[in-house]
Amino acid sequence: MYYFIHEMFANAAILSSFIFVCGYLTRDTELSINSQLRIKFAIGLFTGLLGIILMQYSIQISDAVIDLRYFSIMLAAHLVGIVPAILASIIIGLARITIYGLSIGGIIAFSTTIVVGIGCGLIGEYIAKQYRKKWLIMTFYSTVVGIGTVFLLVRDLFIPFQFSIIFIVSGIFLMYCLRYVREANENYRSIKQNSYEDALTGLTNVRGFNRSLDDLIKNCRNNEETQLSFLLIDIDHFKQINDTYGHTNGDLVLKRLGQVLQSESRSSDIISRNGGEEFSVLLPDCNKENALQIAKRIRESVEGILFNINDTQLNVTVSIGVSNFTNQNMKPEQLVQAADECLYFAKRSGRNLVGFRKNGKFMAEK
């Protein structure tokens, strides 16, 4: 009895370690039945190998090899669905025959392992979002299959009873491990996303902007044919809006402008709120002419919107500076400074204009 509990404890320790390691390695990606096929294949392969490891800490009674390998199949089904669960069950079933030899017991164990894989996989697919319910049903299902398998091989009621108690207790323990890892990863992803997202507008914040700018500049340096343009956008007379209508209404203007920028930009563009009333748009694979067209379209769209504030229709305008990545030695701050100089020229030229440089001279147009 002591040796039985000792080996099952070792199984549970290995399983919980796998859950935490797997959770750490996949903390940036939410695993689900909609995960990519390569991720499902990897999960199926690794949980299959996990089942083989668990068999090294098993109890052999007659033709029965007793361990907690079913949990590795359950993990595959719980995390990403039926495909990896079946893959893991095939790997584990073949390993059972390879390690302990081809026999009646081996054939029965292989068959019931496949049954667990299919059953848990279907449970994982059809109860996808109810994590606790899904795991408990898998535990009950696998316990029933395990009891039947052990009884067929040893013809002793006490051993299946011991197995069922240990399996259920282990299942509850692993359920809490899974919940802890899932909640920790969700919190991690939320914090990471918020660290690069502006809370008011939902756009990229200055930290995310700097990271994206650095990545795009590196890409341009690595590929001379890659083009990059940049728009720096500032709301005209925004301080007056805040002073007249209050900061709450000023925030509404900022949020609405963020929506306009998203609707007028391309899906590949990176839109940021860099602080206060200053916004920016990074335009990958965009030459100077196209960048000017986008900037003018944004300026025109903003000018045509009437903001309803305190039963007053307010017209808001923006000034925009445009710059381009012009040489391989250009630094990120130089791209920003070039746009800032064009923005300043647009402001000096009367606002509600797009500023840019042409043949070395500053120009501003609507």
Image (cartoon, rainbow, N blue to C red):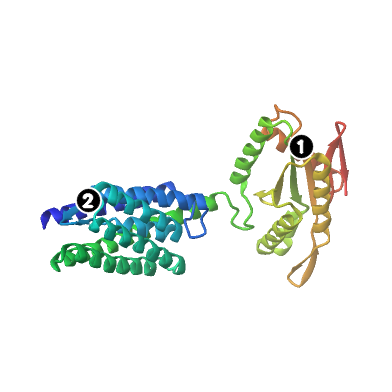
In the depicted view, which residue is nearer to us: 283 or 248? 283
Question: Does 301 appear above or below 119?
Answer: above
Q: Residue furthest top?
A: 329
Query: Which x, y percent locates residue 151?
Result: 19, 66
Q: Which amino acid lies under the numbered mark 1 shown in the image of this protein?
A: Asn
The residue that disc 2 covers is: 10
Q: How many marks?
A: 2
Q: Is residue 360 visible?
A: yes
* Side of 155 relative to 351 (left or right): left
Q: Residue furthest front?
A: 103
Q: Nearer the viewer, mark 2 or mark 1?
A: 2
The quarter holding residue 224 reads top right
The relative height of residue 134 versus residue 292 in the rendered view (above or below) is below
Q: Position of residue 18 (x, y in %)?
A: 34, 50
Give the residue drawn at x 73%, y 71%: 310
Q: Answer left or right for 162 relative to 134.
A: left
Task: From the viewer's side, name the closer residue of 336 and 169.
Answer: 169
**Label 2: how many Cα within 10 Å (few below 14, some 14–19, many 20+):** some
Depth check: give the residue in front, 226 or 77: 77
| 258 to the left or right of 342 | left
- Residue 288, given in percent of the width and then of the height, sits at 81, 40
Residue 24 coordinates in the image, percent (x, y): 40, 48
Tell me the residue at 71%/38% (across/down): 336
| Residue 294 vertical position relative to residue 302 in the rendered view, above or below | above
Q: Is residue 175 above or below residue 270?
A: below
| Snapshot quadrant of residue 78 | bottom left
Q: Which mark is residue 324?
A: 1
